[in-house]
Amino acid sequence: MRIRNYRLFATGAVVSNIGTWMSRVTQDWLVLSLTGSAAAVGITTALQFLPMLLFGLYGGVIADRYPKRRILLITQGALGLCGLALAVLTLSGSVQVWHVYLIAFLLGMVTVVDNPARQSFVSEMVGPDQLRNAVSLNSANFQSARLIGPAVAGVLITSVGSGWAFMLNGLSFLAPLVGLLLMRTHELHESVRIRRGKGQLREGLRYVRGRPELIWPIVLIGFIGTFGFNFPIWLTAFANEVFHGDAGMYAFFNILMAAGSLTGALLAARRRSSRVRLLILAAMGFGLLEIAAAFSPSLWLFSLLLLPIGVLALTTNISANTSVQMASDPEMRGRVMSLFMMVFVGGTPLGGPLLGWVSDTYGARVAFATGGVVSLVAAAGIGLILTRVVGVRVRFDLRGGRPHMRFVPRERLATAA
């Protein structure tokens, strides 16, 4: 935060992130109100992330080719216009579910370029020495806004209607635009920009394929993003069907998730390095807690479990994000991060409708548990692969009569034998 350009970036981001979380909660509840279907909420989420699945890698090429600050000025303005369009439709009383679907898809198209540009622009503002801290603070920023946005959305929806939440979201993008314009460009750490040429997309894929320390964290985050992060579907279904609440309860669930996520982000900001052990154990714990929450018999227990779920969700995400960024060469970082974001959020068009259908057909509890089981199995399986890559093995022992798992060097096991 001592870096002026980053302070401007973070200040603008927290304002727009509050608006984004207001819009997300309002959008999910609006679709549920219009259709009465959790699957429709899943379709909306899927449409918003489908462009990332289809075109995400091209967004990384654009981020590596053009000045990232200039890209962000365009994309942030476009995101604001999408928010204002949905506000006008809702306030006029003419909004239909297909309008929400269309704007969600347009938001996704803009995000294809915005995401890798924003992710890789962080290193230009702070330099490599402060990158880990800045990534963690970005997540803390995002989750702090998640504490405020859903609460404001819940009040606005129940008092004046959904349209005003969408309106405030559209206007909130003025803050990052002003921040970008006020930056001192001569203080940015110049990055290597690639020139237009053939084969740049394939070059990025070959680069990742040849680096196990990149590809396996990306595969793991892909499984978790596809099956474990479908909270708009599950939380709306739990609020509406399981606990028979309203938009205020859904906003409350989001606030609890945000409180846990903020805690996870702040803890990550204090760490000086990324470890495979932390990534794997956090992902496994995340899956286990989702399974436990799915079968929670009471509202208070379900609500309580959302806090540690948020902590482990952010710990998993930040650990994977920072390890991938720090292992990437600067001229490849945009393409690598576009692949990371493509598999993380691009899997939602597959997992969102599928788990929405499971929720409608078999119930919200079964759908939530399914996401937890897939996350747990993926983390355990990929963890075994990663331990071989980094030269360690899993060791089980008993302490106080209870089993414990830890990672130790292979040499230590051989000596003990």
Image (cartoon, rainbow, N blue to C red):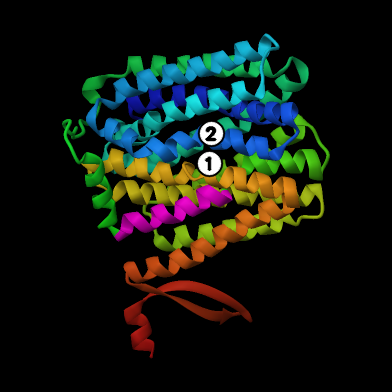
The residue drawn where x is 79% and y is 32% is: 246
Residue closest to the eye, 264 or 390: 390
Which type of secondary structure does the marked residue at label 1 adopt? helix
**Rendered-image quadrant of the N terminus:** top left
Mark 1 — residue?
349
Relative to 8, 376 lies left or right: right
Mark 2 — residue?
47
The residue drawn where x is 48% and y is 24% is: 106
**Rendered-image quadrant of the C terminus:** bottom left
Residue at far bottom of view: 417
Residue closest to the eye, 126 or 241: 241
The residue drawn where x is 62% and y is 33% is: 147
Per the rendered image, the range of residues in magenta is 212-228
Query: Residue 153: x percent and y percent?
Result: 67, 24
Q: Is residue 181 above or below residue 344?
A: above
Query: Residue 87: x percent and y percent?
Result: 61, 14
Query: Residue 298: x percent and y percent?
Result: 82, 51
Identity, as a three-letter code, of the amino acid under mark 1 = Pro
To which quarter of the image does residue 26 belong?
top right
**Mostly what secondary structure, the magenta segment?**
helix
**How far is the residue under mark 2 from the one under mark 1?**
6 Å
